[in-house]
Image (cartoon, rainbow, N blue to C red):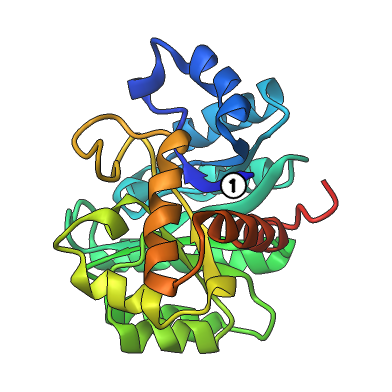
Amino acid sequence: MIFDSHAHYDDQAFDHDREDLLSSLAAQGVGTVVNVGASLEGTKRTVELCKAYPFVYGAAGVHPDEVGSLDESSFAWLKEQCQKEKIVAVGETGLDYYWDKEHHEVQKKWFLRQLQLAKELSLPVIVHSREAAADTMEILKSVHEPGMRVVIHCYSYSEEMAREYINMGYCLGIGGVITYKNAKKLKEVVQHTPLSRLLLETDCPYLTPVPYRGKRNDSRNLIYVAEEIGRLLGVTAEEVIHVTEKNAKSFYGLDGR
């Protein structure tokens, strides 16, 4: 079944139909969802979603745009959330120089702190990186150890950098952008990446794939992502769904669940 490795069902875009939508996913072929905290409040709501839905797991973290809300007290609270039973990753964390809402040094500080937290708790990390390729790579290399589980969410950089991440043992998160006509670079990256290193993700409610681009995204649309990855790699969508589910379960430590 489809494993959505990165969703934001805590977002207000789902306030009017969240329960109906989530309850319908299994019938649409979606077996597991990891809801990803992007702020302190988002992490709180993620923990609540994990309690409410057996197939929903969570990641606890603070997006680079939101790191101004962090201090030692709130970071201690974040650490507590990371130790809850169904929280399976730290994130999303990273660097965002596109929106540039927080000073770069502040972003780097809390990115590093969240990476160190993941290492301390032996959890995988979901990395957000936009317009910050070199600094993201530098920080990840500074803490890298063999066996670290890292996914570069919504991968958007070069084929050469992708190869470097794959050689470090990391995964690439692939979502709706792969279906866009102007996503030539990403299509080339996927063509040269082993399927065993790819995770399916929606980033919903954002980044809806064709043919629904511009509308609210949800996990049911990952079939279109799987079909495009399959086309690029010369395999069936069913094979993409099967392998990426296996990849995600291994990445998040859910093999036995």
Left or right: 6 with respect to 48? left
Snapshot quadrant of residue 34: top right
Front residue of 84 and 238: 238
Give, as a three-letter code, the residue at label 1. Answer: Phe
Q: Position of residue 236 (x, y in %)?
A: 51, 61
Snapshot quadrant of residue 157: bottom left
Q: Please tell me which residue is depicted at 70% across the width and 66% down the height of the picture.
A: 120
Q: Position of residue 241 (x, y in %)?
A: 57, 54
> Callout 1 environment at 10 Å: few (<14), some (14 to 19), or many (20+)?
many
In this rendering, the answer to whether 162 lies above or below 217 is below
Front residue of 33 and 59: 33
Q: Please tell me which residue is depicted at 44% across the width and 89% down the height of the picture.
A: 164
Front residue of 238 and 254: 238
Q: Position of residue 55 (x, y in %)?
A: 69, 33
Q: Which residue is mark 1?
A: 3
Looking at the image, the residue that sits furthest to the left is 182
Q: Please tell me which residue is depicted at 57% across the width and 54% down the height of the picture.
A: 238
- Residue 38 visible, this angle: no
Left or right: 251 with respect to 194? right
Looking at the image, the residue that sits furthest to the right is 256
- Residue 87 visible, this angle: yes
Q: Please tell me which residue is depicted at 66% across the width and 69% down the height of the picture.
A: 119
